[in-house]
Image (cartoon, grey):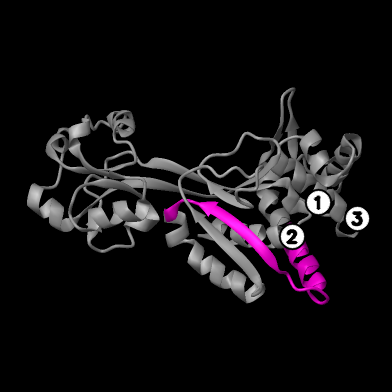
Amino acid sequence: MEWKRSAFDWNQARAFLATAEEGSLSAAARALGLTQPTLSRQVASLEETLGVTLFERTSRALLLTQAGTQLLEHFRTMGEAANRISIAATGQSEAVTGHVAIACTNGMATFFLPDILKKLQAVAPDLQIEIIASNEMSDLRRREADIAIRHARPQDENLFARRVRDTTGHLFASSDYLDAVGRPSHPSDFSKMHFVGFEYPERMLGLMASRGLNLTVANFNFSTASVTMSLELMRKGLGIGILPVDIGTAYSELENPYPDFEPIEIESWLVAHRELKTNLRIRLVFDLLAECLSTK
């Protein structure tokens, strides 16, 4: 791929990045405050400059080509760097202050946010950060939160979403519990074991059955909506549960009782109202969360 460096235009890069993140030319044009024909010309000019096709244009949507996918993270890095430059320049005359509310599950709040917030404090020490640790979906349009970390992409076109990290859920139990009841070698062995359920155990039965574990509600002696509580119940030997692999493997007293269990795919999306495009403090927090969560 030959890049004509002298012809590179940052406005074209912004057009590509917005189109990739928004999923359509019309949404990207609204986000950047441009007309759709102008945005389309910028994307086409960038493709000509780079000598590659970035999008496959279908009747319903724009799909990133392999080249577009490969370049997307590079352009995101450029965009975040440009935002940091803007923030640094603004900070010379005006400190970044104010309140930002972040909504996420208590697991995310406990295991991932503290290290990120420490970095944020070093960058913007005068920000007031509120953590809404709940499994309930905060309504960003009603300003119940400024930024949310969710496990599904929002469908509301008024929200801006970026996929930041994927992980998988696996079975975990304490070694003490498995020493006492025996380690399962076949799915049928689970029928007499105790489980720690997440919120409503009956909702887990179909998921478990799809992976060969035919359980009943009677198997779930404990249930909770809290990941941290589930973790502690497992560590105390009260049953088998499902944890994100990066959390479960961090505790030496836990082990995977049945490696043949098909992992559960877990997505994470960073979501904010489109106001983040112009709100300095929200953009700063959003970009730092995106950078840190994408590399974990």
Magenta-drawn stretch contains 102: yes
The residue under label 2 is 78
Left or right of 184 on screen, residue 252? right
Q: Earlier in the sequence, mark 1 or mark 3?
A: 3
* Residue 57 vs residue 80, the one in the foreground: 80
Measured along the vertical axis of the image, is residue 28 above or below residue 87? Answer: above
- Residue at figure coordinates x 77%, y 67% from the top left: 87
The residue under label 1 is 13
Secondary structure of the residue carrying numbered label 2 = helix
As measured in the structure, the alpha-carbon distance from the residue carrying label 2 to the one carrying label 3 is 17 Å
Give the magenta range: 78-106
Percent across and percent down for residue 109 are: 47, 58
Q: Earlier in the sequence, mark 2 or mark 1?
A: 1
* Residue 95 vs residue 149, the one in the foreground: 95
Measured along the vertical axis of the image, is residue 66 above or below residue 215? Answer: below
The residue under label 3 is 7
Percent across and percent down for residue 250 are: 33, 62
Q: Earlier in the sequence, mark 2 or mark 3?
A: 3
Amino acid type indicated by mark 1? Ala
Extreme residue in the top direction: 59
Amino acid type indicated by mark 3? Ala
Secondary structure of the residue carrying numbered label 1 = helix
